[in-house]
Amino acid sequence: MDRLGLSKCVLAVLLTVAAALPAGAQMANIDYIGYAFETGGLLPSNAGDELTLVAVASNADPVFEVDLGAYELTFHAGGLISTGEVLDGSTTVIHYTGGMLEIYQDGSQDADWGLNPPNAVSPATFTDGELFFRGEFSSFTLYFAPGGYGTFEGTLSALDGTMIDGSCSDCVYTWAGAFLSGAGAQNPAGYDLQTDGGFQIDSTVATETASWGSVKALFSN
Amino acid sequence: MRTMLKVSLVVLAVVALPLAASAQQLFDFNGQAVLPGGVGGALTMYSQVFDASPATTPIPLDFADYEFTLVVTDLVLDADGFTQHYSGGTVTLYQDDLTAADFGNLPTFTDGTAILVGTITALSRTLFPTGIGSVTGSVDWSGGTRLDDIAPQDQTDWGFFSGTNNGVNQTLPGFDEQWDGKIEPREPIVDDAAMSFGSVKALFQ
């Protein structure tokens, strides 16, 4: 089986497993850690500022079939344009528009955040290798609690990558995590946030109950 | 002879330190938490620890041969609200090569060797409107078989940081939230100090 065929097969199994999970079960997850920076810094987040996140997977559910001992999975989220920060009670909320998330599978395992991004190694070492997933954000929101910590969540529609194929157009993916900002957070110089979170298949194509006979009938015409 | 050995070790350390000083250090975990019913109740959290390379763990961990789990117990809710405040919990890092951690069988998280044991001196948990939240706190390490791998001055005031999610697809039966986070020193705990060889020798006179 060629690689594309294998990927499609893996995806089919992935979707089957995900669709079969009962309510309350966990979705397939890739855990990551990383760092983020925004033009002009955070906070404040001014309308038009662009947020970039670069991260590395620390764990991937076996269903993704990626050996993190031999390959790294790197994340690059870019093109997220701030609409400006708003205060909701004591929470600073920032909505973003646009943006893409790319995940690369890379045997060179060379991911390096470096200092003061963008720089010679970041995002470059997070965008090398084979494209594993690419999706466009349909939403992305960042919540700042007083004290410089918070969380973010975005939803994505898949475009391409070895993890998916054309039959996955109905899939919705979630990119979420928590962050810390400011001094003492082990942030490499020039990064505004350190992040820790997960990439998940949030929902899949709908399931439909059918008899085996009716399934066979679909292919008998 | 003992002095010579010490000098050798110091020189070795000075050579090694610049390599480690710039690396991010953390214990990365992903787990499930049970929340208290109200003020005075206790929060527990069971999680697995993963290798977050290229970041490093603050003390070397053998992920190839062992599983590592991180467990929080007896973390008492002191004040409720949009942001909850907790204190008094114990956090333990276990090393185990026998049983795989299973959220349906919680003793599998605590059946290894307790290599680090600490107290959560304070912790805040904020839940945002969509069911996602964030946790930040601090940890003082005080026990465990690997405590001495951390210099005494580096054993206190580590950061505890996590995202939370109470979505139905995130929580397992018997739990209230998924926690995905890390425990880390405020700065890399092996620091780099420029020192003349004369100064090194003076330490042993």
Image (spheres, rainbow, N blue to C red):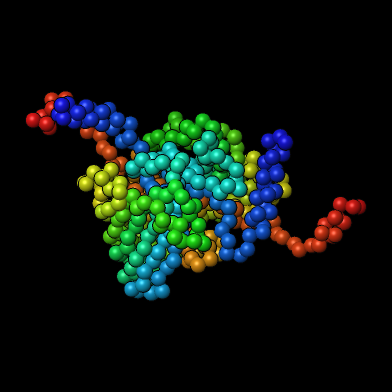
Q: Where residue B79 appears, x then y in whole percent?
A: 33, 71
Q: Residue furthest left?
A: B205
Instruction: Say which residue appears at 28% left-offset and 32% top-offset.
Output: B17
Q: Is B68 or B161 nearer to us in this picture?
A: B68
Residue at 16% from the left image edge and 30% from the top image edge:
B2
Asked whether residue A179 appears in the rendered view, the answer is: no
Judging depth in this view, the residue of B138 and B2 nearest the camera is: B2
Left or right of B28, for residue A71: right
Q: How many marks?
A: 0
Quarter location, residue B194: top left
Q: Residue A54 location, x and y as percent?
A: 47, 41
Q: Position of residue B161 (x, y in %)?
A: 38, 54
Picture quarter containing residue B9?
top left
Q: Is residue A170 above or below residue A54?
A: below
Q: Residue at x 64, y 55 (%)?
A: A18
Quadrant for the N terminus of chain B, please. top left
Residue A6 in view here: yes
Image coordinates for residue B192, horizontal then vertical, percent? 25, 34
Residue at the far right: name it: A221
Q: Residue at x 85, y 55 (%)?
A: A216
Whether residue A160 is situated above or below residue B176 in the rendered picture: above
**Which quarter shows the C terminus of chain B?**
top left
Q: Nearer the viewer, residue B126 or B142?
A: B142
Query: Based on the displayed image, in which of its 4 quarters is residue B203 positioned?
Result: top left
Side (left or right) of B153 relative to A176: left
Q: Is residue A109 above or below residue B85?
A: above
